[in-house]
Amino acid sequence: MLRSNALEAISLTTYSGKLSATDSININDVIDSQAVLNPLANIPGREDAPELVPHTQLRRRSMATVEGRATLIHALAHIELNAIDLGLDIVWRFSGMPDQFYRDWIRIAKEEAYHFRLLSEHLKELGYSYGDFPAHNGLWEMAEKTRDDLLARLALVPRTLEARGLDASVPIRDKLKRVGDAKAAAILDIILRDEIGHVAVGNHWFKYLCSQRGLDPVSTYAMLAEQYGAPKLRGPFNLEARRAAGFDEAELAALQMPG
């Protein structure tokens, strides 16, 4: 069963095991969409490293040094690991959606696993490993806040936190190019290409639920962002990527309003 397999994968504590289990989920497997599943252990399963600290405790390092670039690649790998867990979590946790919903998010989890591998392999080429630097847990903290509300999860994880990656990817890529790390820059291009599709999936299902419930997407998003304490979004925004990811002009206009 596809959703049961997602719960099993997210529960695994070794990163290698989680990657293998995510890869092995058959996207065309039977979908137990009405089942109510319960984890047998704390999720997501994690190894002891990296140490998780508040984001204010993370030091920025110059990308002109190998260690500085490694710190950045490590932070990006941590985001991708969280994204694997987020894809798996939305599959097992929320019942009653159309089959395509679950297939979409399993596909996304698989692509996030690919991104994590690209980044962790490049990190090794720089002389480091995932877990060598501290990281923060902001993505998963929002997942915990929205654990009982699928509409809020869709609004505030893919459409807010992950959509910020659309804005940040190009400036980061350009900095990596300037310091001569062409391979890392190429990885960022792959991630941006795929993340546009991932955010588009979040947009599609958010608007699907809004339509089902007779809700206006723009005002509903604003209400949920306030209710759950989502971070305030500040530009510059990658409007081209956001349009490609399914944000319409009314949403983009609201995004750019002052205050």
Image (tube, rainbow, N blue to C red):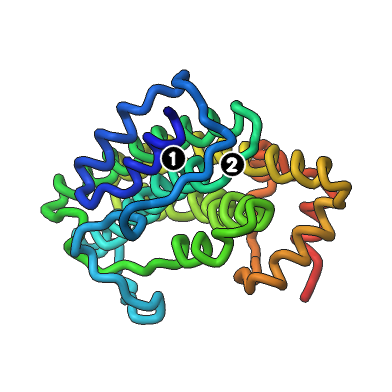
Cα separation, mark 1 vs mark 2, equals 29 Å
The residue that disc 2 covers is: 95
Residue in the picture at 59% in, 59% down: 148
Foreground of the two, 200 or 91: 91
Residue 14, given in percent of the width and then of the height, sits at 20, 49
User: With respect to residue 172, does 67 lie above or below?
Assistant: below
Q: Is residue 173 visible?
A: no
Residue 78, given in percent of the width and then of the height, sits at 33, 56
The residue that disc 1 covers is: 191
Could you tell whether 8 is left or right of 87 in the image? left
Residue 64, given in percent of the width and then of the height, sits at 27, 62
Residue in the picture at 52% in, 44% down: 36
Q: Secondary structure at mark 2?
A: loop
Foreground of the two, 143 or 7: 7
Residue 84's quadrant in the figure? top left
Residue 52's quadrant in the figure? bottom left
